[in-house]
Amino acid sequence: MLEIENVSAGYGAVPVLKSVSLRVKRGEFAAIVGPNGAGKTTLFKTISGIVRPTSGNIRFDGHDLLAIAPSARAHLGIAHVPEGRQIFPSLTVLENLEMGAYTPAGRHAWKDNLEKVHQWFPVLAQRASARAGELSGGQQQMLAIARGLASSPKLLMLDEPSMGLAPTAADEIFERIVAIHSGSGLTVLLVEQRVAEALHYADRGYVLEGGRVVLEGSHDELKSNDRIRQAYLGM
Amino acid sequence: MNIAQFLENFLQSLIAGLLTGSIYGLMCVGLSVIFGVMRVINFAHGDFMMLGMYAAYYAFGLLGIHALFGSAAGPYVAALLAGPVIFLAGVLAHRLLIGKVTGMRGSVLQSEGHYAQLILTLGLALILQNGGLYLFGSTPVSIATPLASNAWPVGPLYADKIEVFVNQGQMVAAVIAVVVVLGFVLVMNRSRLGKSLRAAADNPEAATYMGIDVERSHRLAFGFGVGITAIGGGLLASGTSFQPYVGLEYVIVMYAGVVLGGLGSVPGAFFGGLTIGLVQQLSTLFLPNQLQNTAIFVFFLFIVLLRPQGLFGAALRRT
Amino acid sequence: MLDVNWRRQTLLIGAFAVAYGVLAAFVEHSYYLLILAVVPVWAVMGLAWNLLSGYSGFVSFGHAAFFGLGAYFVALAQIHWGLSPWLGIPGAAVIGACAGLVVGIPTFRLRGHYFALAMLAYPLALLYVFEWLGYQELALPMQRDHAFAYMQFENQHLYVWLALAMMVGAMLLTGRVERSRFGMALVAIREDEAAAEAAGIRTLAWKLKAITLSGALAGAAGGFYAVVLLVVTPPAVFGMLVSAQALIVAMFGGVATLWGPVIGAVVLVPLSEILHAQLGNIIPGIQGVVYGVAIVAVILLAPEGVFWKVKDMLVRRRERSVPELAAAIVADVVVLPVNRQRSDGPIAMEVRSVSKAFGGLQAVRDVSIRITRGEILGIIGPNGAGKTTLFNLLNGFIATDQGDILFEGVDIAGRRPYEICAAGVGRTFQVVRPFRRMSVLENVVIGAYVHCATDAQARATAEAALAQVGLQYQQHKSASMLTNKELRLLEIARALAGQPRLLLLDETLAGLGAAEVDEIIAVVRKLATQGITIVIIEHTMQAMVRLVDRFVVLNEGALLAEGLPQDITRNSAVIDAYLGKRWRAANA
């Protein structure tokens, strides 16, 4: 469904991604792990169009993604839940979800999606009219994910959903993500700091280091690979 | 001067301040949309307002609004019509000029983008002012409604010593201003478009992820901003005369109001404008009339130096 | 800027002035002579604007304030005190300078658009005040008896030549400023004020000097203008068109250059004046429209002016044809880690229980670190751990909520970044911050000013610093043309020029390839052997383990662990922080 071929990208003079290739199949749960500065967030930004690659191409669901304007990519069915939650703080919880349903697909299935989202994350129903900026970190993360789901996406991209959360909150988030994937068959691409969890549930994993894919494999192949520890800690 | 006299002057200024302040509030709301959503300083804002005043003037005269609605209500209708006209002008200006130096495309470094916006809108202001001088002539005009020359008496109060007057024209204008502000706030809060504008202001990157075209949002916000201020200008025109350089007089008033109200807060901007109106009118109690605007400038400088985040409204947090 | 041949520049200025003056001698029509006299006045205004806004980047829409004050001073002084403009104009310069200082002190506390708005307000406020004071139209009295003593010349040519003299003076002054550390500091401030401060530049002091000088020039220009026109009205000298003209003349010709405002004045002023004369009746406001269109066109097509556009085109053509000079590789590339225990020896910096919160977020939580002199300390930790915040605290960019920071025993908490730099702490930045419009050498010279009294010393120190990092053959290259690796080395060199005893390196290895990483590591190693204490934040662990003596690990703002690389990378708490508890459990 998503094919990234030899993509290089960076910011100004600083190259971050160096000829990265990966693929995500329909219905798959793929995980990208790797230390900071490896380029994981940059990769997501390139997929979403905020960063323009210097070379390579990206295909999504048969479309050449690079030929499509950034704000149009969501309409194709890509939902990007960004790093650091990035909810709209001055809008209410419900309004944030409404913005998630900005795409035609989202609007079409609004009622159903809202119900499902309330089931998965009941707190969002309870605090529907609260300003999003007032929620706790964990609640904001749930809101961010729900907002992504509200667009009825074909691909859900999650950038470090557990970052900055207390361990129990992070566990909860992770379990929900897994439940959503197994429940709806949605294609999920996850970037995670918590390597073991990510690789445990993922069908396929990629290890990104220094802007390159240094390791890839099924979750069996990667589960206990010390190369991963080395990637993070250097020796 | 005795107490009663002073009180009377004070109350009169207070009323005048509230009424003109309401119109200023409307104008400030327009500016705050642009400033809040786009973080753009628009030096030409006063000049778009001037265009609105002339649009109202021509609608009133040439397009027959006068004939249709009479001379009492006509100016107000013309003022309202000025809104959509200037909205279109604003959208055009953004597409051709302003959009090229603002938004996600416009700047590599925050500071570079700012510099270009400031200078571009300054150039635009000069073009509008002086182009206006050519197109409209330098003779002041107005679409004064006869209501502006009548006033409702309030009083007598305080044992017959105090009587103040409420100018009818200003009162009607103030009510219209408040209604327009309320209407706009409603649109911003309830409509999908309004929510997408607010989302784009909160976090343009995340808004793009949602599929919101931030560039288009900015264009619309710019159009709304100048359009709303144009209505305010039209309302002002129903009471006073104006000429092509009128924009300069009000630029600082509007910025003072927006900054006072707190960046990014539309209701805050209204109250900021109201306060500026009050300051302006109350300053006549102890300053000569000609220094009214200087009083505002000084007040503005104080706000900006001492409390740049404003009195009302929350500071806009960009995630 | 450093290497401008000032002798040649002075000759050029002189030649231009002579040519202009001779040309004027042939003109007899009084209207054209008036234009010829007014062009240098606007050139001076443009140079004045340039001095503040062009070089330092603080856009002023309020130079009319200084201009108007100067004009009114000369007029009023002559009317009330009988003061001749020969004295009045210098007096106007003094008034302008004082006004500049008075305006600058509060207004420089404002950022970005607030500064521009405030500057816009000053002349408008003054306009109203002067109208209220009753000075709607002030005419300079005719002095038939002592005409020359009152600058009222029969021969109009004298006005032109006098204006020319004033312009030459302003140009020579600007040239002098450009070449000195004054000009360099201003450009550095414009390019990146934070980096300039970290390099030891006293930003506020230089900005105030700039606005004072700028105000003086504008005041003198205003004073002369009053003499030439013989009538002063508030809109004519305080109006927005005046500020706009100062700005457009400088911008059109070339921001932050000596000749830019002159070019702009020579092209735009006659153009608008003639259009006004010919079409002013048919199309009132033509001048304003011309200037407005010029401003819009310039900002969209050539934002930095004609001068730079042309120069850029020429430079690009030249640099394409010159072959790349390879950077000299410094010393030997050491790949094996050198394990040095450095826990004894005097303490270079001590961080004691430092905390910092932003709103509700605790970014740094009770962190205590001791940095030994001469060691290479690595600060690592997962994303959001507070590493850069810590550097910003050490460097003076932000203030601590609690705790002390002692550098060589002295408390540096609350000191400004340039003071900390002067005390001996240098810094590089996570996102590289070169001064793009300057050459490599100029970038580094900025860093040298803090400890070098003369410009010659600064240059020598800069050249030495460049040699230390291996960039000495790239001295004259523009910073905007450097590769990522060269930019990193440039930042290190700039910090070195400040003769630091402790160097804070923030993600110096980001985005580099393996060979480039080795080069930088070699440079850093050499610096450490010369006795500089190094503290480095990095994510590239492969490199760090080869470089550092000791690690300090931060997680969620707090100190998690410290010790030798081989211990840290197997430390269970550290592994948990980076990889998650489950990983450790699965791989115990």
Image: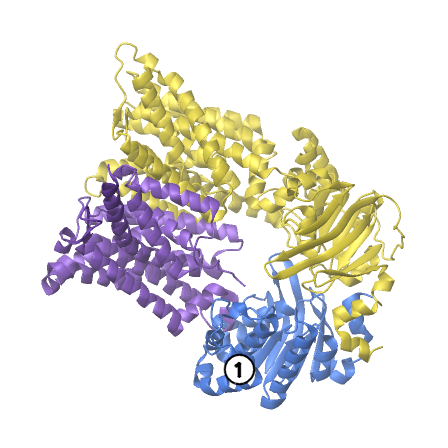
Relative to residue C464, is residue C106 drawn left or right?
Answer: left
Q: Residue at point 47% right, 34% down?
A: C259
Q: Residues within 10 Å of mark 1 (few under 14, many from 20)?
A: many
Chain shown purple: that is B
Relative to residue B4, is residue C414 drawn left or right?
Answer: right
Which is more toward the observer, C556 or A47? C556
Which is more toward the observer, C369 or B98? C369
Relative to A154, say whether C530 is above or below.
above
Q: Quadrant of residue A175?
A: bottom right
Q: Residue at point 46% right, 33% down?
A: C102
Q: Position of residue B301 (x, y in %)?
A: 42, 43
Instruction: Tell me what hue chain A is rendered in.
Output: blue
Q: Which quadrant would the N terminus of chain C be assigned to in this image?
A: top right
- Amino acid tagged 1: Pro
Instruction: Tell me what hue chain C is rendered in.
Output: yellow
- Numbered disc total: 1
Residue at the far front in the pictured view: B159
Q: Position of residue A136 (x, y in %)?
A: 59, 70
Dot 1 falls on which chain?
Answer: A
Q: Position of residue C75 (x, y in %)?
A: 32, 23
Q: Position of residue C377 (x, y in %)?
A: 80, 53
Q: Quadrant of residue A212?
A: bottom right
**Residue at the spot of label 1:** A153
Q: Secondary structure at mark 1?
A: loop
Q: Which quadrant would the C terminus of chain C be assigned to in this image?
A: bottom right
